[in-house]
Image (spheres, rainbow, N blue to C red):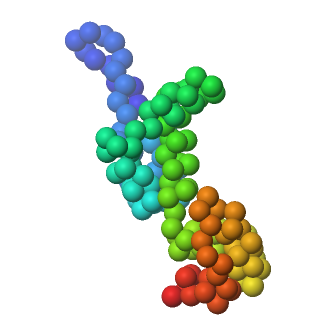
């Protein structure tokens, strides 16, 4: 929205504040407006003095076409991904695979095959143990 300033005769831009749960740029609804808990853990660690990641952000800015803000977001995304607990990983993958239309037998089998390839491989869990992580 553009309004005119009577004193200077120049236009002034006024952008309304974004609604909670919407993207401030496009206005589309966000999938996870509250942010994920593991993201919050990463941000808490990032703000501590003993876990700086500025050198990694600097490296990404130098070696890729990313701007500083984008590189910071990439670093936070990667750290949040690897900060997931086994339970969070199993629940997230179950939701993702279920949204693709897969059945639970296929989902739990696929998750069992993916888990050893995590950065820190959890113990081998049976389909029953995975089902308990998802459904309680």
Q: At which x and y percent is residue 121?
A: 62, 67
Nearer to the camera, 57 or 107: 57
Vertical placement of 33 versus 110: above or below? above
Residue 70 is left or right of residue 128, and the answer is left
Q: Is residue 132 visible?
A: yes
Please give the count of numbered marks on the rendered protein.
0
Residue sitting at x 55%, y 56%? 81
Q: At which x and y percent is residue 75?
A: 52, 42
Q: Please, which residue is most extreme toward the top here?
A: 8
Residue 98 falls in which quadrant of the image? bottom right
Q: At which x and y percent is residue 123?
A: 61, 76
Nearer to the camera, 59 or 22: 59
If the image is split into quadrants, where does the N terminus sit?
Answer: top left
Vertical placement of 85 versus 14: above or below? below
Q: Please, which residue is most extreme toward the left here?
A: 7
Q: At which x and y percent is residue 50?
A: 34, 43
Residue sitting at x 36%, y 39%? 16
Vertical placement of 8 versus 19: above or below? above
Residue sitting at x 56%, y 49%? 78
Q: Is residue 98 visible?
A: no
């Amino acid at each position: 929205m553009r309004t005119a300033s009577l004193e200077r005769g120049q236009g002034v831009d006024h952008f309304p504040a974004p609604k909670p749960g919407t993207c401030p740029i496009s206005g589309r609804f966000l999938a996870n407006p509250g942010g994920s808990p593991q993201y919050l853990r990463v941000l808490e660690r990032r703000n501590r003095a003993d876990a700086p990641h500025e050198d990694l952000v600097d490296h990404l800015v130098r070696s890729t076409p990313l701007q500083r803000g984008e590189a910071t977001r990439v670093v936070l995304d990667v750290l949040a991904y690897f900060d997931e607990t086994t339970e969070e990983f199993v629940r997230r993958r179950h939701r993702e695979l279920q949204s693709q239309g897969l059945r639970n037998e296929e989902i739990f089998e696929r998750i069992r095959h993916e888990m050893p390839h995590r950065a820190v491989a959890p113990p081998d869990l049976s389909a029953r143990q995975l089902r308990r992580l998802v459904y309680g």
